[in-house]
Image (cartoon, helix red, strand yellow):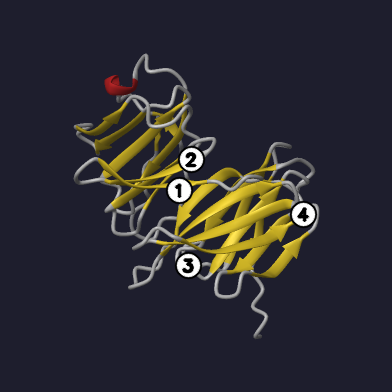
């Protein structure tokens, strides 16, 4: 675990990361953890293990909220809904939706015959119709699956790239989806029509490993297996 000191007043912000002295004994000797995420308030932490275990803690007290030893064969990805009510966990062939308060599974989403689930993200628009997106790898490239978060039914399947998806994220306003591929390409997708808004060919020399939007959704930071990081400004087609 790492921590940093935030700048105060009008100081120029310099991020000084250091190893934290705090020891999370609840996560000692539990094996490799492949997924970790906080809820939007930073008050709940979820971790998923290579062994398929799923643990949810209050933060920073580390009081256990959910402890499921066999949530999946292996937990690959996790995400909280914007209101923190639901947690989605992704395994090799199954996606599960958990009610955080009751610690119960409320829905299980199965993949199609040629689909491999890769990433899961709730839409970050806190309105009446938020969506759950799952990025999937298929025989024909990468697709984004859209689910209704009331019925948990799939409402749309959109093939968006020809290569396998290696990274995925959603902007804070829910307007854009970002996809990174194994070939190093970046795609910005408009969530309203699932069309490519912007593409950066060979943004990286290696596969894209991580993506995150700026808070105002005007820029995208990407990282790659080639040890590079890139800031991409998002172009507005209407301008």
Relative to residue 103, is residue 54 depicted above or below?
above
Q: Is residue 158 visible?
A: yes
- Tag 2: Cα neighbours inside 10 Å, few (<14), some, or many (≥20)? some
* Residue designated by label 2: 94
The single residue placed furthest to the top in the displayed view is 29
Tell me how far mark 4 sits from mark 1, CA to CA: 24 Å
Would you say the residues marked 4 and 2 are in contact, meaning their CB atoms lie under 8 Å apart?
A: no
Q: Residue at x 43, y 31 (%)?
A: 72
- The one nearer the camera, 139 or 193, is 139
- Frontmost of labels 3 and 2 is 2
| First in residue order: circle 1 vs circle 3 | 1
Viewer-nearest of labels 4 and 2? 2
Seen from the viewer's position, the closer of residues 158 and 224 is: 158
Q: Are marks 1 and 2 in contact (CB under 8 Å)?
A: yes
Q: Secondary structure at mark 3?
A: loop
Q: Position of residue 148 (x, y in %)?
A: 42, 64
Where's residue 142, x and y in %? Answer: 68, 52
Question: Which callout, 3 or 2, points at the residue further toward the start of the chain?
Answer: 2
Mark 4 to mark 3: distance in Å? 23 Å
Q: Residue furthest bottom?
A: 239
Q: Residues within 10 Å of mark 1 (few under 14, many from 20)?
A: some
- Label 4 crowd (10 A; few <14 / some 14-19 / many >=20): some
**Where is residue 34 shown, x and y percent of the image?**
49, 30
User: What residue sits right under mark 3 in the picture?
Assistant: 174
Mark 3 vs mark 2, CA separation in Å: 24 Å
């Amino acid at each position: 675990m790492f921590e940093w000191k935030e700048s105060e007043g009008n100081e120029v912000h310099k991020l000084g990361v250091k190893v934290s002295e705090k020891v999370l004994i609840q996560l000692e000797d539990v094996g490799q953890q492949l997924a970790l995420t906080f809820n939007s308030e930073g008050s709940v932490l979820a971790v998923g293990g290579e062994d398929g275990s799923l643990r949810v803690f209050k933060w920073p007290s580390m009081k256990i909220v959910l402890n499921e030893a066999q949530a999946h064969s292996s937990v690959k990805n996790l995400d909280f809904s914007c209101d923190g009510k639901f947690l989605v966990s992704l395994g090799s062939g199954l996606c599960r939706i958990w009610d955080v308060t009751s610690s119960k599974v409320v829905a299980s989403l199965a993949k199609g015959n040629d689909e491999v689930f890769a990433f899961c993200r709730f839409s970050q628009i806190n309105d009446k119709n938020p969506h759950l997106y799952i990025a999937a790898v298929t025989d024909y490239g990468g697709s984004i699956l859209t689910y209704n978060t009331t019925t948990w039914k799939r409402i749309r399947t959109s093939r968006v790239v020809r290569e396998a998806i290696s990274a995925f994220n959603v902007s804070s306003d829910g307007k854009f989806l970002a996809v990174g591929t194994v070939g190093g390409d970046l795609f910005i997708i408009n969530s309203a029509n699932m069309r490519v808004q912007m593409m950066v060919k060979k943004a990286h020399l290696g596969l894209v490993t991580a993506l995150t939007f700026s808070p105002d959704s005007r820029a995208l930071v990407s990282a790659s297996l080639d040890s590079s990081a890139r800031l991409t400004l998002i172009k507005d087609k209407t301008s």
